[in-house]
Image (cartoon, rainbow, N blue to C red):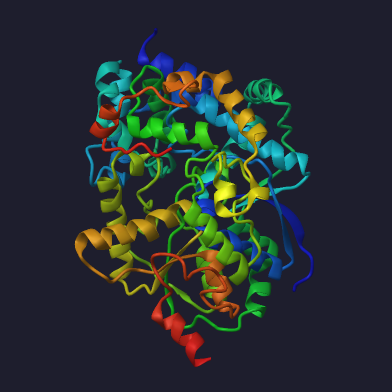
């Protein structure tokens, strides 16, 4: 393991190119990012502080900072940075590196869980299928279950549209990607249980109910 | 029915089909009215969310986005989307694979395992750009049956439609004009309000991380629009819609107030001006309702 900055440049460099990531070195702490940040008005997020912490290799401190996760990725600071620091992309990459090192919040693991299980962050449900049925009559013809991955076993039967059954072969393609990149492993997804390896107590502590 | 303008693959994403299908049905309907045909993308998945999923693992985000684009390429069609999140992910992934051959190569190594390939032959269009540039303001003006005069609209552009501007190529992110042009084409007035360009407050995993903070942020946005007498907020993003509509109802409940700002997706707003009532554009099933000013136009007509 190198410095946090090296990790950020390596990991993000493979997606955005190293030059894009190396702009973090140009940050002179002017604070414009922080001045324009809509999140910073109501949370402890100080974007320039995040970049200073990376420059000073304060890995543990960043990993344990709740404010790292209060950026909504609105790109306001990215547009306005006078030094051309690729702020929002850097924040996403710093979060990636933290997640990869095991500092991922359970609320965010749930985002992955839904995609791995259903193909969607927000999957279809019966109420929505019925809503779609109504819209099909009133607005324009749409299927009661959209023809996307929608791996919710049994939902098509329950909704009364067995012909719209989910497509396991499409889901299999997605799961192959999750296995290939190692993502399933780093969120702690257990393929035998088809669920996260977390206890109900941990879920409760994070204020979550098991739903997927 | 207008002259034929083209056929596009509709990348649905998650929120549009699975929470606000009114946006899906109405967008297809209004596109059809203007001669734009829609084809479904069988087996498409989550985009995946650029801020939330992109914050966890960009190395997985990219090949999933590439797979989605590959589906449209196999159909030999360009894509349109009704969510800034979907636009952000697919447009950015497409851009990155075109800019960096190694990124494309790695995505294709993974797609090769599932028998697909990203070639870079499709184009990712935001539906609002197709309305603005392909259909054009003149054709829209010609179809107005119920002019929206007297209706004050607060524009909400969302973030990932415009930014990063160097990648999106939609012009200035500081002085955007697309929603203003469209709502004014149907007779409404776009009213400026404090922090018009502010994010809805849900992105980047903030909503899932801390709903309280996220809703407090949204409350500010809504109050700022209400303070200048906006009758409704018009926007181009299903994800923002979830926060501004459903989120707003949560805020109203928590605060014990009943007055909510109507939130309307842009194609549904255009549909109203074309004379389709709220039920005919699927606006009757959401939390916030159409403004009385608009309902009165239908009742008196």
Q: Is residue B80 above or below residue B110?
A: below
In this rendering, does residue B19 appear at all?
no
Q: Residue most toward the bottom?
A: B300
Q: Is residue A124 above or below residue A20?
A: below
Location of residue B117 (image quadrant): top right
Location of residue B100 (image quadrant): top right
Q: Quadrant of the N terminus of chain A?
A: top left
Q: Quadrant of the C terminus of chain A?
A: top left
- State the residue in front, B227 or B295: B295
Residue B143: x and y in percent read: 65, 78
Residue B196: x and y in percent read: 38, 59
Question: Is A68 positioned to the left or the right of B48 in the image?
Answer: left
- State the residue in front, B276 or B213: B276
User: Residue at horizontal 20%, vertical 61%?
Assistant: B255
Number of residue marks? 0
Question: Is B165 positioned to the left or the right of B138 in the image?
Answer: left
In this rendering, does residue A199 appear at all?
yes
- State the residue in front, B188 or A137: A137
User: Residue at horizontal 39%, vertical 65%?
Assistant: B287
Q: Is residue B203 above or below residue B117?
A: below
- State the residue in front, B129 or B50: B50
Q: Is residue B280 above or below residue A100?
A: below
Residue A100: x and y in percent read: 41, 19
User: Residue at horizontal 61%, vertical 65%?
Assistant: A136
Q: Residue most toward the top?
A: A1
Residue B7: x and y in percent read: 75, 56
User: Residue at horizontal 45%, vertical 82%?
Assistant: B295
């Amino acid at each position: 393991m190198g410095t946090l900055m090296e990790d950020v440049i390596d990991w993000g460099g493979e997606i955005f190119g190293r030059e894009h990531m190396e702009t973090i070195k140009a940050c002179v702490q002017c604070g414009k990012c922080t001045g324009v940040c809509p999140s910073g008005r109501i949370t402890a997020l100080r974007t320039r502080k995040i970049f200073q912490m990376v420059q000073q290799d304060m890995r543990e401190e960043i990993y344990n900072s709740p404010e790292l996760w209060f950026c909504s990725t609105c790109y306001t600071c990215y547009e306005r940075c006078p030094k051309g620091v690729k702020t929002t992309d850097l924040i996403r990459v710093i979060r990636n590196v933290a997640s990869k090192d095991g500092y991922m919040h359970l609320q965010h693991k749930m985002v992955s869980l839904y995609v791995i299980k259903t193909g969607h962050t927000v999957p279809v449900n019966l109420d929505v299928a019925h809503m779609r049925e109504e819209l099909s009559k009133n607005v324009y013809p749409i299927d009661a279950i959209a023809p996307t991955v929608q791996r919710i076993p049994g939902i098509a039967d329950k909704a009364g549209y067995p012909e719209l059954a989910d497509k396991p072969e499409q889901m299999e393609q997605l799961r192959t990607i999750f296995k290939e990149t190692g993502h399933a492993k780093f969120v702690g997804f257990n393929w035998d249980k088809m669920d996260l390896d977390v206890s109900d107590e941990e879920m409760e502590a994070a204020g979550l109910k098991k739903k997927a | 029915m207008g002259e034929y303008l083209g056929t596009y693959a509709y990348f649905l994403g998650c929120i549009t089909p699975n929470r606000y299908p009114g946006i899906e049905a109405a967008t297809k309907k209004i596109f059809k009215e203007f001669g734009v045909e829609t084809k479904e993308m069988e087996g498409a998945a989550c985009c995946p969310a650029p801020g939330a999923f992109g914050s966890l693992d960009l190395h997985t985000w990219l090949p999933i986005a590439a797979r989605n684009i590959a589906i449209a390429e196999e159909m030999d069609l360009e894509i349109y989307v009704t969510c800034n999140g979907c636009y952000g992910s697919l447009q950015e992934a497409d851009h990155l694979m075109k800019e960096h051959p190694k990124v494309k190569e790695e995505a294709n190594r993974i797609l090769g395992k599932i028998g697909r390939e990203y070639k870079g032959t499709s184009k990712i269009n935001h539906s609002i750009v197709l309305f603005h540039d392909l259909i054009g303001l003149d054709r829209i003006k010609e179809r107005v049956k119920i002019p929206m005069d007297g209706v004050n609209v607060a524009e909400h552009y969302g973030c990932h439609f415009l930014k990063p501007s160097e990648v999106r190529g939609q012009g200035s992110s500081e002085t955007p004009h697309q929603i203003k042009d469209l709502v004014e084409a149907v007779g409404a007035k776009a009213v400026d309000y404090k922090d018009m360009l502010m994010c809805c407050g849900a992105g980047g995993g903030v909503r899932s991380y801390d709903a309280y903070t996220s809703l407090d942020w949204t409350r500010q946005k809504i109050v700022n629009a209400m303070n200048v007498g906006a009758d409704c907020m018009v926007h181009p993003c299903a994800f923002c819609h979830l926060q501004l509509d459903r989120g707003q109802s949560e805020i109203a409940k928590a605060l014990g107030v009943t007055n909510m700002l109507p939130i309307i997706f842009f194609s549904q707003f255009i549909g109203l001006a074309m004379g389709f009532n709220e039920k005919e554009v699927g606006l009757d099933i959401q939390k916030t309702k159409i403004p009385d000013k608009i309902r009165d136009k239908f009742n008196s007509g």
